[in-house]
Image: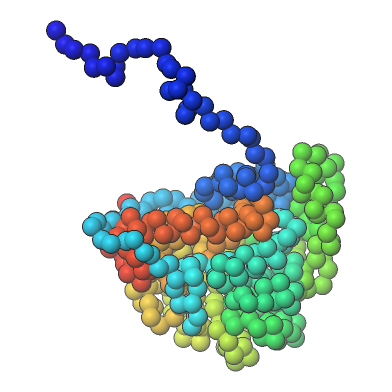
Amino acid sequence: MSHTPEALKRRIPKVADLAPLMQFKKPEFSQSARLRRANTIGDLRAIAKRRTPTAPFDYTDGAAEAEITLRRAREAFLDLEFRPGILRNVEKVDTSVTVLGKESALPFGIAPTGFTRMMQSEGEYAGSQAADAAGIPYTLSTMGTASIEDVARAAPSGRNWFQLYLWTDRERSMELIERAAAAGNDTLMVTVDTAVAGARLRDVRNGMTIPPALTVKTVIDASYRPAWWFNFLTHEPLAFASLNRYSGTVADLINSMFDPTLTFDDLDWLREVWKGNLVVKGIQTLDDAKKVVDHGADGIVLSNHGGRQLDRAPIPLRLLPDVAAELKGKTSIMLDTGIMSGGDIVAALALGADFTLIGRAYLYGLMAGGRAGVDRAIAILDKEITRTMQLLGVTRVEDLTPDHVRFL
């Protein structure tokens, strides 16, 4: 006859046994508590969606046409397998990298994003200050809602870069270039994939304008997001701090501003007038990557504009191995689009990127909680990068190689 262990015999629980289990915590509803509970960028996105009106949230979250490009970009990261090494001493991990001649504490920076104060009133100020605190670069967009000078004042010790759209009006472009240099920006990032505006259908369906319009639809939408509207209405009205004030749709603005006649000759002009680091963003083929390096680019960003321009465009992560095989060590290779975790960043670095840029990932944090939300987004990615490197058996970014990943 089998013997029943004492531990498996039923008994009436004793109060002394229950006491350690009954540790009820007082519910916390503050912003800081809400952000602490966010453990992934996806968690921040969920908070952002609850707190932000549909039009600005969809402007951030959406992409062009059927959004095939964005979906494929994220699937490319999911379609990777890590190949870990075991029995390595990974107690201490160094996540720093050198990018364009200076150190970044983490292997990612903040990408240029337009209309940022529309997502949350702290906008570019929150992004630049959080980047400064984290020791990473911050890139201000030509379409930003804080001026070059204001960002420099907000983050005086930060490494600030400026993103430029070349206009048909070269004098206005030159004015921005001179302002960026005077404000201490060491890197100019020229975006080359916006000859015309992509068809961002979520924005069209939402009737999104700059500034946001108070219609019956937006008022109803705002009725259960009062904090956003309170912030929006009690701060300085939205404006493009690098441009004149503008009222109209995003697509109309882009189509009226940007120059569809740009060629590599214009890149030569930029190389001549800008004395700092010149980075070309929007590279989608190996041939173009090699050409812009031949025309003097110090760095390239493999990017399809976050899927917001040409639908079914090439996926940067898929393009990366070929570009790295040809250009590693000859130029600074950066990558954006589809990054939603520290593991994504580690995968890109292993496949040959020198650096990465985050756009939506930080904007979700901004919409979830302003400056504190951006800090939380950076902290989440930092922790994920460190943990992923440790589990791969790697303690330095430069030790990541293609042997650590493979596409399924």
Q: Residue at x 77, y 46 (%)?
A: 227
> Where residue 68 sits in the image (x, y, percent)?
52, 51
Split into 4 quadrants, where in the image is the N terminus? top left
> Where residue 349 sits in the image (x, y, percent)?
40, 66
**Residue 404 visible, this orientation:** no
Q: In this orientation, which residue lies closer to the viewer: 241 or 62? A: 241
* Numbered disc total: 0
Q: Residue furthest left?
A: 1
Q: Quadrant of residue 269?
A: bottom right
Left or right: residue 260 versus residue 407 is: right
Q: Residue furthest top?
A: 1
Q: Residue at x 59, y 83 (%)?
A: 186
Q: Quadrant of residue 332?
A: bottom left
Q: In this orientation, which residue lies closer to the viewer: 194 or 17? A: 17
> Where residue 231 sits in the image (x, y, percent)?
80, 53
Q: Residue at x 36, y 72 (%)?
A: 398
Q: Is residue 227 shown above or below 345?
A: above
Q: In this orientation, which residue lies closer to the viewer: 133 or 389? A: 133
**Residue 83 visible, this orientation:** yes
Q: Residue at x 49, y 70 (%)?
A: 105
Colour setup of the view: rainbow
Q: In this orientation, which residue lies closer to the viewer: 398 or 195? A: 398
> Where residue 374 sits in the image (x, y, percent)?
61, 58
Q: Quadrant of residue 118?
A: bottom right
